[in-house]
Image (cartoon, grey):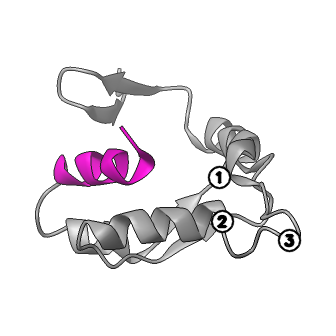
Amino acid sequence: INLADAIILSAQKTPLELQPHLYRRIILSGGNFAWKVPKGFEDVAVDAATKVRMLLRERGIEASVELTKDPLYSVWKGCIVYSIAVPDDYLWSWDRMEGWYKWR
């Protein structure tokens, strides 16, 4: 499965009304997306954001795809912020796919 198909499958699991908003801005992060087109190969290669945008367009989806400013560490930084922001008394239910605070 290529990345465009994975994005589409993920978006299809959300409510129909939400899907256009998800495609409005797709953000790629992680070191695997950080590569640039080698000099001299501009006519045969593209960067990750352009490739994903092209794959989605082939499937009839116009999407804004961009790379984070710091793709190598952006996921790691996000996890740190998330771990600080989520309270210790927050429980996740895998059955309901929802999170709740403990009140007692």
Find residue 11 and name its label. none
Report, in whole angstroms, how far the alpha carbon at label 1 lies from the one at label 2.
6 Å
What secondary structure is found at the residue carrying circle 1?
loop
Mark toward the start of the polypeptide (3 vs 2):
3
Badge 1 amino acid: Ser
Marks 1 and 2 in Cβ contact (< 8 Å):
yes
Report, in whole angstroms, how far the alpha carbon at label 3 lies from the one at label 1.
25 Å
- Which residue carries the number 1 mark? 29
Badge 2 amino acid: Leu
- Which residue carries the number 3 mark? 40
The image position of residue 33, as x and y in percent, is 68, 52
Q: Residue at x 65, y 52 (%)?
A: 29
- Which residue carries the number 2 mark? 67
Q: Nearer the viewer, residue 87 or 48?
A: 48
The image position of residue 45, as x and y in percent, is 67, 65
Q: Residue at x 25, y 66 (%)?
A: 59
What secondary structure is found at the residue carrying circle 3?
loop
Query: What range is drawn magenta here?
Result: 1-13
The image position of residue 48, as x and y in percent, is 62, 60
- Give the side of residue 60 with respect to residue 30, left or right: left
For label 3, the crowd category at 10 Å Cα-Cα, with few meaning under 14, some 14 to 19 and many 20 or more, is: few
Q: Residue at x 38, y 54 (%)?
A: 4
Decide: is 75 above or below 51: above
Report, in whole angstroms, how far the alpha carbon at label 3 lies from the one at label 2.
22 Å
Badge 3 amino acid: Gly
Decide: is 10 above or below 98: below
